[in-house]
Image (cartoon, rainbow, N blue to C red):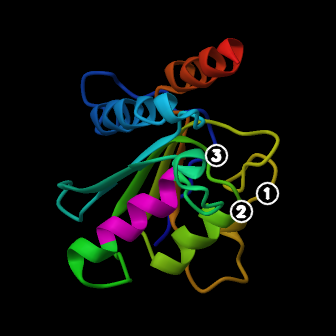
Amino acid sequence: MITVHDTPYDPDPVRDPWRDPMRLAMAEAALAVPAGDVPVGAVVLGPAGELLASGHNEREATGDPTAHAEVLALRRAAARLGEWRLPGCTLVVTLEPCVMCAGALVQARVARVVYGAGDEKAGAAGSLWDLVRDRRLNHRPEVIRGVLEQECARQLTEFFREL
């Protein structure tokens, strides 16, 4: 059964299982800044909650338009597991996935996507579009939104302010 969280995330901070992984994703996002990339970071957790892979935006660094944090983290997790399917895995990302990344999440069969800041201009996990929960698709991951939302948004805002 798929559970969908459509309300802002406001858990008990003592028992919150997503705060620490989101902090890892935020630390990963900071690694994008020296190359001039937008600070978005992602981590993939295995079924037991273990860290499988991480990634940050590398479009500017590599000249690759697909080098979004989510795509890179999914590629690395798949390589580590030796399998393109990532059932039972969770992708934690600082910014709501775009259409490309949402499609990659569905294709990888991740169980859950957890994101920090929403993206009203390009978000595809509930803000502008809701690709990940489209009932016409054969796989729909659980979506948990708003984890450390203000901190994630601040990281992005500070980057763009300095530009």
Distance from Cα at disc 2 to Cα at disc 3: 19 Å
- Quadrant of the image occupied by residue 46: bottom left
Task: Please state if 127 lies on the left or on the right of 72 as rendered.
Answer: right
Task: Please state if 25 lies on the left or on the right of 3 as rendered.
Answer: left
Residue closer to the observer: 130 or 80: 80
Residue closer to the observer: 3 or 49: 49
Q: Amino acid at mark 1?
A: Trp
> Which stretch is magenta?
69-77
Nearer to us: label 2 or label 3: 2
Q: Position of residue 14 (x, y in %)?
A: 25, 22
| Helix, strand or loop status at disc 1 | loop
The residue that label 1 is drawn on is 129
Task: Please state if 39 lies on the left or on the right of 54 as rendered.
Answer: right
Residue closer to the observer: 106 or 26: 26
Q: Position of residue 104 (x, y in %)?
A: 56, 71
Marking on residue 99 = 2
Marking on residue 6 = 3
Q: Position of residue 96 (x, y in %)?
A: 62, 45
> Is mark 2 in CB contact (under 8 Å) with mark 1?
yes
Q: Quadrant of the C terminus?
A: top right
